[in-house]
Image (cartoon, rainbow, N blue to C red):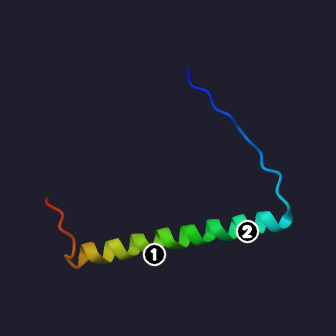
Amino acid sequence: MLRSFQTRLELSDRQATVIARHASYSRWIYNWALRLCGEADRSGLTNRQP
């Protein structure tokens, strides 16, 4: 049997703003790293074996 729990955070406006900034920054870093890995892969800098 699977169970799940849902929790709601009651944040102030300032807390919600801080969380939104962190989420946006994390997403930006993820996309930057993904692009960097893609460029390295295309230029042959990775050591992947087919």
Image height check: is 7 above or below 12?
above
Q: Residue at x 85, y 61 (%)?
A: 12
Q: Quadrant of residue 41?
A: bottom left
Q: Quadrant of residue 3?
A: top right
- Horizontally, residue 31 falls left or right of residue 15, namely left
Mark drawn on residue 48: none
Mark 1 residue crowding within 10 angstroms, few (<14) / some (14–19) / many (20+) = few
Residue 33, x across and y down, in percent: 42, 72
Q: Quadrant of residue 45?
A: bottom left
Residue at the limit of the structure toward the left, as seen here: 50
- Horizontally, residue 21 falls left or right of residue 37, namely right
Say which element carries label 1. helix
Q: Residue at x 18, y 63 (%)?
A: 48
> Dots 2 and 1: beta carbons under 8 Å?
no
Image height check: is 12 above or below 35?
above
Say which element carries label 2. helix
Residue 36, x across and y down, in percent: 37, 76
Mark 2 residue crowding within 10 angstroms, few (<14) / some (14–19) / many (20+) = few
Amino acid type at mark 1: Trp
Residue 13, x across and y down, in percent: 85, 65
What quarter of the picture does the N terminus occupy? top right
- Horizontally, residue 30 falls left or right of residue 35, namely right
Image height check: is 43 above or below 34?
below
| Residue position for label 1 | 32
- Earlier sequence position, callout 2 versus callout 1: 2
- Horizontally, residue 37 falls left or right of residue 46, namely right
Amino acid type at mark 2: Val
What quarter of the picture does the C terminus occupy? bottom left
Mark 2–mark 1 Cα distance, whole angstroms, equals 21 Å
Mark 2 or 1: the one toward you:
2
Mark drawn on residue 18: 2
